[in-house]
Image (cartoon, helix red, strand yellow):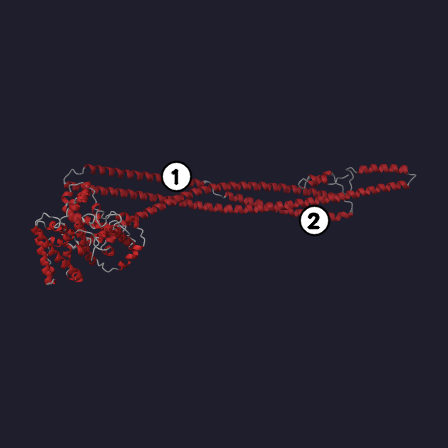
Amino acid sequence: MASPAVSPDSSSHEALSSVNSAPACSPTSDSENLSPDELELLAKLEEQNRLLEADSKSMRSMNGSRRNSGSSLVSSSSASSNLSHLEEDTWILWGRIVNEWDEWRKKKEKLLKELIRKGIPHHFRAIVWQLLCSATDMPVKNQYSELLKMSSPCEKLIRRDIARTYPEHEFFKGQDSLGQEVLFNVMKAYSLVDREVGYCQGSAFIVGLLLMQMPEEEAFCVFVRLMQEYRLRELFKPSMAELGLCIYQFEYMLQEQLPELNIHFRSQSFLTSMYASSWFLTLFLTTFPLPVATRVFDIFMYEGLEIVFRVGMALLQFNQAELVQLDMEGMSQYFQKVIPHQFDSCPDKLILRAFQVKYNPKKMKRLEKEYAAIKNKEMEEQIEIKRLRTENRLLKQRIETLEKESAALADRLIQGQVTRAQEAEENYIIKRELAVVKQRCTSATENLQRAQTTIRQLQDQQGNPRFSEEFVTHLETELEQSRLRESETLGALKEMQDKVLDMEKRNSLLPDEDNVVRLQEELQALALREAEAVKSLTELQQQVKDLSDSWQAGRAGGRWKDSPQRSNANALQEAVVAARLREAQAQAELRALRQRVLQLETQGQIQRTVLGRAEQTCAGLREQLRLAAAQSKGLQAQLSESHRKHAEAQCKSKEEVMAVRLREADSMAALAEMRQRVAELEIQIRLLRGPLAFGAVGLGTRLGDEDSLGSSDEELPPFALTHGDIGDLGDMGDSSDSETEGAPTAP
């Protein structure tokens, strides 16, 4: 299958020759399963391998045979003939492996593993990688064109990182090169297929290597299979839990196989994740040059992440002597500049050392379980810490709520006192209004009594029988009505007095200021306990700080001055001191938390008690306020009714006075007419008595004097009233001067 990658012929020749460059492992265990032709082919390969090892220019002569014009014609022709035979045999062998893949995978697995470890030929990598991961016929391949038409939320991130993926490689060099475009397409398509993972920066290097070997659709299928079946998806998840597991397992291997180097790393605070994270995330594609990294990737396609552990440990074993002499900065530079180019000319040496590393799959499974248990414990601790923080936050909110409720309760108590003052003021106003009503009622009663006295006098002086009986009956009826109204007014007054007494009793039952004093005392006691707890916590934290400072000083003073055994003992002692320090800090924090919880519980209990009392007090105050409002409304209604009735009584009294005045005016007019008639009759009598005219005139003079005397206060006409009586009757109303002045007076 053709590959879009642009690579020199020398790399393909190197890959072909590397099949036999490593020490051959004769497949004796599978000799019974091989046919005679296959055994003959393997023998030829081993013979060619021995010839290449005997030649002093084995690898360089094959890679640069076309460029080295100074080499001898004999050696060049021999190398070319050997290479042509080797290439032809390799093509035949791998062609048979590809055509009979199922048979080789089932019956000749060990031989296939040895051939893959020696390196897959460049022209066969695309199809062999697809066969190894079973990505030849995947349904997702048909969806690739549709995925490219969709938009992904990771497009900006992918565009940003593409330029940093293989920046020196010809296939990816340039902003709008073909390599960058197909790399963007594959990464975008996968971010749409697996939205949980989306895009991770290290995955672009793996996809870039695949695109060097095969078209983008096939590279996409292979990458999907790698993510699903080779633990890469767990490595690239946002949580990166699988990366933490790999680092944990690698640290165990380092501690077990290279304890001295492990101690040096720890003394320099050189964490495993600082140099090994990129190994697992990019499978050494960012560490080694492409020829070496491709050999590691060949084995990864068949054996999985095990080769990453092996190669990583092989690198550390190979460079242990140099690393233990460097500090942290020197080790970082060494990992970046020296280690990547140590095996450029002989990748088989790296592969051979990698498979000499001890790797126990059972221990790896056990470490995986231990790591899962540790993570579960950490998760439980985080959940517990989160729960405690949540409870602490809720308790703080509860305290704030209780403080607000206490403030609101104090405000309500103050408001209750203000309300009681307002009620007392309203009671005083009602009492004053009742006093005014009583005074008015007394005044009305006195006016009624004066009116009754006047009526009796009028009845005594009444001489005309035509008005006496009807007038007396009418006045008696009005008197009864006035008495009825008076009795109603007195009843309303008594009822209002009873209600005022009831309100005074209820005001006396309102809570006094003792409750407020108790609340203040409880708050002061709570503040004192809180201050003591804070003081004890501060002292404990100071002790922990002093212990930590002394430990740090001892640690700084005694480092790198003793022998390795003494340093190990010091390290153990420091670890013990650190553990004790952490234990002391944990105990201090636990004690502080318990003290805080106790304080919060005490405060909560006090606040609940205060709140209960306040709620009872508020309920009583609300009930009393409601009753007082209802009573006030009733009193106001009764007062309005008494005002209305009093106004009606005043109107009726005025009407009665006016009627009396009108009848008095009529009586006075009739009296004047009678006097005029008497005068006329006297004149007629005088005229009839001519001779006695003089005497009659004298008699008339005496009668006129007597009449003038009769106008005094000694003898009054039947319906005549004095000015004083009329004024007394006018006092029953609103002292209207206009009405009094407009009434007729006695002559």
Residue 178 appears in view: yes
Q: In this view, does 647 lie to the left or right of 674?
A: left
442 or 133, nearer to the observer: 133
223 vs 379, nearest the viewer: 223
The front one of 683 and 639 is 683
Residue at image coords 92%, 39%: 690
The amino acid type of the residue labelled 2 equals: Thr
Q: Quadrant of the N terminus?
A: bottom left
Give the numbered dot on residue 477. 2
Task: Name the residue: 73% across, 38% down.
Answer: 723
Looking at the rendered structure, the secondary structure element under dot 2 is: helix
Whether residue 350 is situated above or below residue 720 in the rendered picture: below
Q: Where is residue 451 shown, x and y percent of the image?
A: 70, 43
Circle 1 residue:
524
Amino acid type indicated by mark 1: Gln
Residue under the image location 58 percent in, 47 percent down: 637
Q: Where residue 601 sits: x, y (%)?
A: 36, 45
Give x and y (percent) for residue 531.
Answer: 35, 38
Residue 25 placement, left or right of 475: left
Taking the image as drawn, is residue 572 in sight?
no
